[in-house]
Image (cartoon, helix red, strand yellow):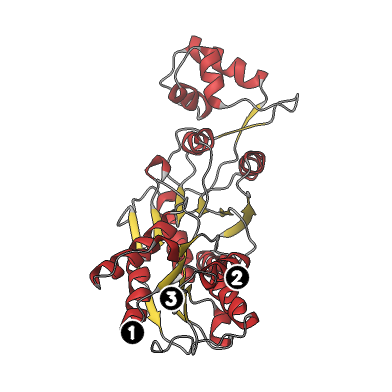
Amino acid sequence: MAAREADAEQAPADGGRVTITEIARQAGVSVPTVSRVVNGRSDVSPQTRARVEDLLRLHGYRRRPATSATRAALLDLVFNSLDSPWAVEIIRGVEEAAHTAGVGTVVSAIHGRSGDAREWMRNLRARASDGVILVTSALEPVLYEELRILGVPLVVVDPAGSPALDAPTIGAANWSGGMAATEHLLALGHRRIGLIAGPPRLLCSRARLDGYRTALESADLTLDDTLVVPGDFHPESGFTGCNTLLDLPEPPTAVFAASDQMALGAIEALRRRGLRVPEDMSVVGFDDLPEVRWSAPPLTTVRQPLADMGKLAVRTVLRLARGEQPDSPRVELGTELVVRSSTAPAS
């Protein structure tokens, strides 16, 4: 394990929570100085060391247990939520790579809530986790800063926004995947193509929308904003979004749903209206989750290598834990259009 700038855990006796940044403020020194004191570095004056040590004791800080110098022994895998088969595929890849490396994993969900994220951070310090894989989630800046101070390596999978701390990111080629899905429908003769988009806060959602828009522009078609409806990657939003599209004065003849689960919701909306897929409307998804090959009809979709993304995240965070740098700070794995029975030529 590379030397860490700081390696501390706090457990204030009064149950409160004081950050290392606050310790530095009270001591009148910089955060790196507190980090050096925590790690027992010699390049701190005796007077400053004594002042900082007094504050550390006052607030109940304890040094984290030492870990192996050659590998990480425990990784934290953190999702915003775990209520999707998409998350299961990521976990499958992470677990396989971690098992091969002899590393344990702890899976958590923070649900986008500040309290949950802070509780997770307290637990991370307590178990002295040696690396974090953050999936489609965002942390408060103070928590990113605390990870940096603690020296815990961080890798971000499918970043929710701009990555913090210059952390390496791993994703899929969402733009080209969105373009491939739309081009497939265009090649089948569809000209009114609806999009059930993902959450706009996510980079992957915006990239899939951009791919859809680019394909339309390349076909000399003007983007009709009424054909783009919001979704949240869950089946209910696909059901609602498809109904919104069907209620238009001129409904689309095809729908690209930005996730497989939304595509399945769209197919259910069509079924309840007595419409057939693909005879009355073609449907394309995104993800290629295992269950969609068994849907009725089997779903045409864009495959993103979710398990491979999880495996690469483990390999990357282990390299960081050894003090090495990844080959590239930004990695996009390729996507692939998988054509099944849910798409057909426009009537």
Q: Going from the N terminus, do you reach mark 3 or mark 1 first?
A: 1
Q: Amino acid at mark 1?
A: Gly
**According to the image, label 1 marks what residue?**
189
Q: Amino acid at mark 2?
A: Phe
Circle on res. 129: none
Q: Quadrant of residue 208?
A: bottom left
Q: Quadrant of residue 221?
A: bottom left
Residue 326 seen in render: yes
Above/below status of 189 relative to 287: below
Other residues around mark 1 within 10 Å, as few (<14) / some (14–19) / many (≥20): some
Q: Residue pushed farthest front?
A: 249
Above/below status of 102 relative to 55: below
State the image coordinates of residue 163 (x, y, percent, origin top left). Answer: 41, 46
State the image coordinates of residue 167 (x, y, percent, origin top left). Answer: 40, 46
User: CA separation, marks 2 and 3?
Assistant: 21 Å
Q: Going from the N terminus, do you reach mark 1 or mark 2 first?
A: 1
Residue drawn at point x = 44 percent, y = 62 percent: 226
**According to the image, label 2 marks what residue?**
239
Other residues around mark 2 within 10 Å, as few (<14) / some (14–19) / many (≥20): many
The answer to whether residue 128 is left or right of residue 316 is right
Q: Going from the N terminus, do you reach mark 2 or mark 3 first?
A: 2
State the image coordinates of residue 344 (x, y, percent, origin top left). Answer: 42, 89
Between 258 and 150, the residue placed more toward the observer is 258
The answer to whether residue 170 is left or right of residue 141 is left
Disc 1 is placed on an element classified as: loop
State the image coordinates of residue 215 (x, y, percent, origin top left). Answer: 29, 70
**According to the image, label 3 marks what residue?**
303
Disc 2 is placed on an element classified as: helix
Q: Amino acid at mark 3?
A: Arg
Residue 172 seen in render: no
